[in-house]
Image: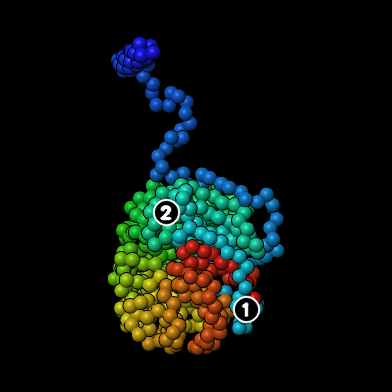
Amino acid sequence: MEKKEKKFVDWLKWTTVFVIVFYIALITWWHLYVPGDNFALQSPGADNRPEGSARSANDVVIGEFFMNYSAETETASASFDGRWTSFRGERSLNIISNNDPINTSADDYPLLWSVTTGEGHAAPVILAGKVYFLDYDEQLSSDALRCFDLATGKELWRRWYRSPIKRNHGFSRTVPAVGDDYIITIGPEGHVMSCDPLTGNLLWTLDMQKQYNTEVPFWYTGQCPNVDNGVLILAPAGEEVLLTGIDCLTGQPLWTTPNTLHFKMSHSSITPMTLSGKLTYVYIGVGGVCGISAEKSDMGRLLWSATKWQPSVVAPSPLQISTDKIFLVAGYGAGGALLQVERAGDKWTASILEQYKPSEGLSSEQQTPIFFNNLIFSVMPKDGGAHREKLVCYSPQNLHQPVRTSAANERFGLGPYIVINSKLFILKDTGELYVYEISGDNFTLLKHQTVIPDGADAWGPMAYADGRLLVRDAHNIKCLKIN
């Protein structure tokens, strides 16, 4: 029995040795063998692969993806006719005056629907019962234009594209511009996209960094698109072009303003004004303030500029307070300034009449003040002295002494505000809504409601149409019924 066991062990040993030697030889042959030398060098494209199909992750194809969430052509909001079509609404005033009743009872405004968003501050626009806003999907590293039904909050479609960026106080922060034939967005990296507002079909795109050598601000693009008579008015503030007018339907440039001032892009948006009888686009760039003709006879001509007041960071837009005066504000200690524009025939001059620190007078860090009933309404910044973070109103004749301030316990941080039928709605940046009645040079608190529980960084501008008020914080958009 022992002899048989010994033979088996010997057989197993030699078999193992043979297998090891065989595989060593096979592996050695595999590495040393040259299969042939009849290879031909192929030029790029010889494999007939479609151009651009092997791009890197950082290449951006604006608007390349689309998702339709509803086959319905009619929505629950089909009968709605309210409009809030751009940043600060009609004529960039942030004021609504119509016959809509506003509920001022003690009862809370009902929440109709809510949407979770990517982290950001991009606010919605409303047209024909549809809500549009720009969002950012962090998992897909993508900008996304999203369309919702105003009545139900149901998402109807989404147009999106990859644009990998890092979080920097959120991502998206601009308000679209919408009309009957277009919806235009500007993404965090200066990507401009125009789509059909009904179908979401892509009309045209523009990359401001590539086209104009625009230097996007540190906290991403804050400039909101402004449309005037079917023309997108854009401030690339690039190497050669300061402002440009672009056809909303075709994307074709119609005029440009050379950047002889060497301004760079700020977070501020272009504001249309009539100054000394002249239609003008006013823009605060990094480097100063300028006025560009908005009239057909000399469209795009630089009329005037002022460089004495030039904060390094500007978020609020310029505010017209008379036929020849513009109020300017910025954060980070810049405070406020008063600019006067004078015209003598075809010649223009612009001068800073006064400027001051935020603790010395009316100021704002992020939101653009509202000029209503010949008073300027604002929320003071954190460095605004005794009135820090309070709601205030000032007379244009005295920018240093407030006419009225909110109570000591009514402070709002960087939250937005809007006037609807003489009611001032203001959202504290923690998600609390306050409603004031404006009467003459006085305002009285009517309602106070927490509308975003555990809200954080509620900085995005509010939007209103058809009795619905849309508010947002960094992660949510909510629709309230306020009539």
On residue 194, the disc is none
Relative to the observer, which residue lies in front, 274 or 226?
A: 226
Q: Residue at x 48, y 83 (%)?
A: 374
Left or right of 342 in this view: 32: left
Q: Between tags 1 and 2, which lies in front? A: 1
Q: Residue at x 61, y 65 (%)?
A: 113
Q: Position of residue 129 (x, y in %)?
A: 64, 62
Q: Residue at x 41, y 53 (%)?
A: 189
Relative to the observer, which residue lies in front, 349 or 438?
A: 438
| Disc 1 from disc 2: Cα separation | 37 Å
Q: Position of residue 478 (x, y in %)?
A: 56, 67
Left or right of 91 in this view: 483: right
Q: Position of residue 125 (x, y in %)?
A: 55, 63
Q: Amino acid at mark 2?
A: Gly
- 31 relative to 443, above or below: above
Q: Secondary structure at mark 1?
A: loop
Q: Secondary structure at mark 2?
A: loop
Q: Quadrant of residue 361?
A: bottom left
Q: Earlier in the sequence, mark 1 or mark 2?
A: 1
The answer to whether any part of residue 134 appears in the image is: yes
On residue 102, the disc is 1
Q: Residue at x 30, y 78 (%)?
A: 357
The answer to whether any part of residue 97 appears in the image is: no
Residue farthest along the front direction in this orientation: 1
Residue identifier under label 2: 190
Position of the C terminus, as image quadrant, is: bottom right
Relative to the observer, which residue lies in front, 304 or 169?
A: 169
Q: Quadrant of residue 218?
A: bottom left
- 248 relative to 427, above or below: above
Q: Amino acid at mark 1?
A: Ile
